[in-house]
Image (cartoon, grey):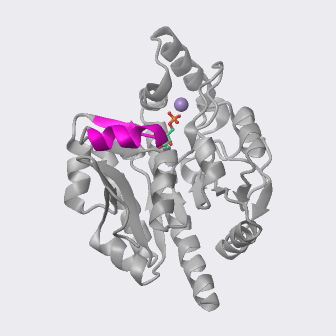
C-alpha cells in the first residue's frame, strides 16, 4: 500500500510502523516552517517526535522536500527543511505547485490531513487549527473543510486566538465536525484555557475518545473528530492579558495590507514580539502537550483495533 501513491516518500520507520500496525501520530510542518522562529522550530519538531516515541508510538512529520511528499522525516531532512529559504505553505491547492516546481513546503492542518489520510494514519497532533479570521468576509481556513472531509482524530488547543472563535465553531458545526473538550466543557482559546464557548461533547480519557471516534466513523461519517485540550496550566495566558496584543497585531496587519496565507504567520510572530516571547513559550508547551495526548490516543486506538482483527 505504501508504494502505490505517486510523489509519496515514506521514512523507514514510518513504513515499518504502517506494516506492523504500530501506533502512529502525524505531525504538520507549517508550524515548523512558518509558525515558529529558528532554532525553536527545530527544537520543537524534534521535541514532539521524542514525546511521541517516549509513549511507544511512531511520529510521522509530513512535509514536501524537493517536490516529494514525505511521510516521516529523518533528522537531516528536518534540518534541511528549517534551513531552506523558500518554503511554500501547503494547503490542498498547493500540492501540485510544489510537485511540478520541485519546491519545499510546510503542510498546514489541511495539507497534513490529506497526506496522513492517504498514508492510513488515524491520529494527528497540531497546535491550533485555522478558522474564520475576524473582520474579513472570505478568509476562512481550508483547515475547516479538510476537517469535514477527513476521518482522523485531530488533537489541538482549539483554534488560534487570533481568529473569530464563535464563527469558527459555527462553521465546524455546519460542516458536521464534532468538537470534543478533553477534560473540559469549554473550547480552549489556544493561549488561554477557556473561551467561554461550549464544545459539542466532553470526554475524559483516551479510551473514551477512541470509542467516540470509532462510533462516529462506524455510522459512516467521514469527518475528523477534533479533540481540544487547554494549554498546560503553568503556561496558559489569561484572555484579558493577551487580547490587547491580538488587537494591536490585527490592526497592524490591516495597515500593512497583509492578507491570505501570510496573515496567520504575521500575527503569530507579531504576538511573540508584543508579549516578549510569552506567546511563543505557550505555543511550544501546548504543542508538546498535544503530541503527548495524541500518542496516548494512538496507542489506545491500536490496542482497540488489534482486539477486532
Ligand atoms: N498551529 C500553530 N502554529 C501554526 C499553525 C498551527 O501552533 O503556525 C498553522 C497550521 O498549519 C494551520 C495554519 O493549518 O497555521 C493555518 O493557516 P491559515 O489560517 O492560513 O489556514
Ligand atoms: Mn487563512
Viewer-closest of 219 and 37: 219
Residue 46 shows in the view:
yes
Closer to the camera in the image, 226 or 94:
94
Horizontally, residue 113 falls left or right of residue 6, namely: right
* Percent x, y of residue 174: 77, 42
Helix, strand or loop for the magenta stretch, by majority: helix
Q: Which residue is drawn at 45% across and 56% down?
A: 115
Location of residue 296 by image quarter: bottom right
The structure residue drawn at horizontal position 58% and vertical position 57%, both measured from the top left corner, is 155
User: Where does the N terminus fall, quadrant-wise?
Assistant: bottom left
Q: Tell me where the magenta segment starts and ends, as one range.
A: 87-100
Return the x and y of residue 119 as percentages of the image width and height.
44, 65
Rendering quarter of residue 62:
bottom left
Q: Position of residue 165 (x, y in %)?
A: 69, 35
- Residue at horizontal 46%, vertical 29%? 261
Tell which of 55 and 150 is nearer to you.
Answer: 150
In the foreground, 92 or 182 = 92
Where residue 246 sits: x, y (%)?
57, 25
Looking at the rendering, in which quadrant would you find the C terminus? bottom right
Left or right of 187 in this view: 43: left
In the figure, 296 relative to 110: above or below?
below
- Is 205 covered by the magenta stretch? no
Amino acid at each position: 500500500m505504501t508504494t502505490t501513491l505517486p510523489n509519496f516518500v515514506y521514512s523507514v520507520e514510518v513504513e515499518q510502523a504502517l506494516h506492523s500496525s504500530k501506533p502512529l501520530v502525524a505531525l504538520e510542518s507549517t508550524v515548523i516552517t512558518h509558525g515558529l522562529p529558528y532554532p525553536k522550530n527545530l527544537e520543537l519538531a524534534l521535541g514532539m517526535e521524542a514525546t511521541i516515541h517516549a509513549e511507544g508510538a511512531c511520529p510521522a512529520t509530513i512535509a514536501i522536500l524537493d517536490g516529494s511528499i514525505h511521510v516521516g522525516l529523518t533528522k537531516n531532512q528536518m534540518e534541511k527543511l528549517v534551513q531552506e529559504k523558500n518554503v511554500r505553505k501547503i494547503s490542498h491547492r498547493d500540492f501540485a505547485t510544489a510537485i511540478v516546481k520541485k519546491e519545499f513546503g510546510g503542510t498546514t492542518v489541511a495539507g497534513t490531513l490529506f497526506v496522513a489520510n492517504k498514508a492510513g494514519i488515524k491520529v494527528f497532533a497540531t497546535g491550533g487549527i485555522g478558522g474564520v479570521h475576524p473582520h474579513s468576509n472570505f478568509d476562512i481556513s481550508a483547515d475547516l473543510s479538510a476537517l469535514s472531509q477527513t476521518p482522523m482524530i485531530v488533537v489541538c488547543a482549539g483554534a488560534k486566538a487570533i481568529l473569530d472563535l464563535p464563527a469558527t465553531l459555527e462553521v465546524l458545526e455546519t460542516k458536521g465536525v464534532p468538537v470534543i473538550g478533553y477534560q473540559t466543557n469549554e473550547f480552549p482559546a489556544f493561549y488561554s484555557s477557556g473561551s467561554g464557548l461550549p464544545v459539542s461533547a466532553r470526554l475524559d480519557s483516551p479510551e473514551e475518545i477512541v470509542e467516540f471516534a470509532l462510533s462516529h466513523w462506524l455510522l459512516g461519517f467521514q469527518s475528523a473528530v477534533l479533540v481540544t485540550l487547554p494549554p498546560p496550566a503553568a503556561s496558559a495566558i489569561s484572555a484579558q492579558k493577551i487580547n490587547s496584543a491580538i488587537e494591536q497585531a490585527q490592526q497592524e496587519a490591516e495597515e500593512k495590507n497583509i492578507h491570505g496565507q501570510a496573515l496567520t504567520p504575521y500575527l503569530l510572530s507579531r504576538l511573540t514580539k508584543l508579549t516578549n516571547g510569552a506567546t511563543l513559550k505557550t505555543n511550544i508547551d501546548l504543542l508538546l502537550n498535544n503530541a503527548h495526548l495524541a500518542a496516548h490516543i494512538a496507542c489506545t486506538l491500536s490496542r482497540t483495533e488489534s482486539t477486532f482483527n
